[in-house]
Amino acid sequence: MSNDFQFIEVGRVDPTKHAAEKRATQFIEIYQPFTQPQVSSQADRCLDCGNPYCEWKCPLHNYIPNWLNLAKQGRIMEAADLVHETNTLPEICGRVCPQDRLCEGACTLNEEFGAVTIGNVEKYITDTAISQGWRPDLSNVTPRKERVAIIGAGPAGLGCADILARNGVQAVVYDKYPQIGGLLTYGIPSFKLDKNVMATRRSVMEGMGIQFKLNTTVGKDISFQSLLDEYDAVFLGMGTYTAMPAKLPNEDATGVLQALPYLIGNTHKVMGTSDAATPYISLEGKNVVVLGGGDTAMDCVRTAVRQGAKSVTCAYRRDEANMPGSVREVQNAREEGVKFLFNRQPVAVKADNGVVVGIECVETQMGEADATGRRRAEIIAGSEQILEADAVIVAFGFQASPAAWFADFGIETNEWGLVKASKTDANPFQTTNPKVFAGGDMVRGSDLVVTAIAEGRDAALGILNFID
Ligand code: FAD
Ligand code: SF4
């Protein structure tokens, strides 16, 4: 029985977290799962708004109030069917989406009563249904003769493969890594996303008839031309991997690390797959300063804590309100012992005999908003200071990394190196080569899992139009 006043009588509750001391030493997911009574009570807080802002704000336009209602009643298999109508990886989005900036941030209840805990209900529905044997029902799908090659098994490529498979088209996904997931597997640490979650999703997708050809770099192990020859269309979901340089004096000092290789090396260690190409870098016993304020920076500070760093400080040039990272992850980092220094802009790496000993910063104050709507960080004269450090991690984001062979096939990029893709309804995400489609980070720039999934799924609709 639903209660119209549940949102007043029952407050927002998040799942219990493991204690910070336990978290600080372990690479395990920090949130414990909801129970069905918790899900029923939290989902019942939803007002079933006539115009659900949560749904509009979600890049996938998930049918949030509808599946909250099913979850509330314990109708988990039906909820899982509905969740998958709009989302390829709901168990991943439930874990890593910045809900505070998306669905939950837009929830009608957010300001006054506390948003409905949408993300954790989404995670509960999907995890529970899959563990109880839920699989997508493709019994009404008529197989077609067309085949599509997908380069990249990240969220964009998987989103594309999902829609193609549901329309009877054979999707063959190529990836240079041994596991699917892209940054979900190798970038995002396992304290946010356990690696078994992606492995389970792989078996679900293989059950749908999607083929994975892993350990295969297109352009090296197999030519792009051979894919064009063999398949009816090709989707590119290759991500962005060129680190934004810090442009600081002494940036090449020993002990200055780039965020992604550091995180990838750690993930391989956790997965037991380390090799010379993905070396493990231990920051045990070190004073670590991480430069940056996004999700990648938060993952670095929390990884360093777990490695046993002596101290971990995040230095960010704007204030806390203007940080791009999820509020939830900043809070988790704080609980785990990370110190935050806001309004600190790095100006030089301090090195002794080529080895980092600190980072010179200046203080900033917040000025007018720039073109993106975020307030500028203005330097305060005479505010120079040195933060002592024996490891500095640069987490300033990523630039495009277009393949050298794009130009040979008429695949154009813009001035930032991002692949140009059509946004028209007729052929969404078609590149300047009509047989080639692209989406995710390599088209929009480094962004979010949910937007990459959305673009991969939309591109699949463009491919279906193209091959019809
Ligand atoms: P990717 O996930 O990068 O996948 C691209 C795939 O293409 C890779 O598997 C790669 O191996 C493959 N590939 C590339 N070139 C070739 C080739 N020539 N041949 C074969 N395979 C190839 N987003 C969130 O929403 N929440 C978070 O908490 C979050 N945390 C993040 C933490 C970190 C450290 C990073 C770096 C990013 C984070 N993001 C987060 C962003 C999110 O992970 C990305 O936006 C998303 O993964 C992009 O998806 P994609 O499919 O476009 O690319
Ligand atoms: Fe429910 Fe909040 Fe969405 Fe309204 S905005 S339908 S209350 S989850």
Image (cartoon, grey):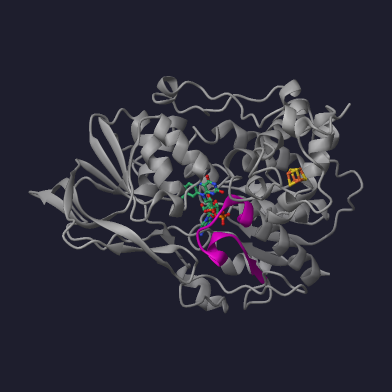
Quarter occupied by the N terminus: top right
The picture quadrant where one finds residue 269 is: top left
Residue 372 as seen in the image, left or right of residue 75: left
The residue positioned 47% from the left and 53% from the top of the image is: 324
For the view shown, which residue lies furthest in the left direction?
Answer: 353
| Residue 298 in sight from this viewpoint | yes
**Was residue 11 drawn as part of the magenta stretch in this picture?**
no
In the image, residue 339 above or below residue 451: above
In the image, residue 99 above or below residue 156: above
Write down the region rendered in magenta. Answer: 436-452
**Ligand 2 rendered quadrant:** top right
| Residue 42 in sight from this viewpoint | no
In the image, residue 325 above or below residue 390: below
Quarter occupied by the C terminus: bottom right
Image coordinates of residue 308 in percent, x first then y, are 31, 27
Image coordinates of residue 193 in percent, x first then y, are 55, 36
State the residue in front, 155 or 97. 97
In the image, residue 149 above or below residue 91: below
**Was residue 449 drawn as part of the magenta stretch in this picture?**
yes
Image coordinates of residue 251 in percent, x first then y, are 22, 56
Residue 302 as seen in the image, left or right of residue 413: left
State the residue in front, 423 or 185. 423
The residue positioned 42% from the left and 59% from the top of the image is: 398
Image coordinates of residue 214 in percent, x first then y, are 57, 47
For the view shown, which residue lies furthest in the right direction?
Answer: 140
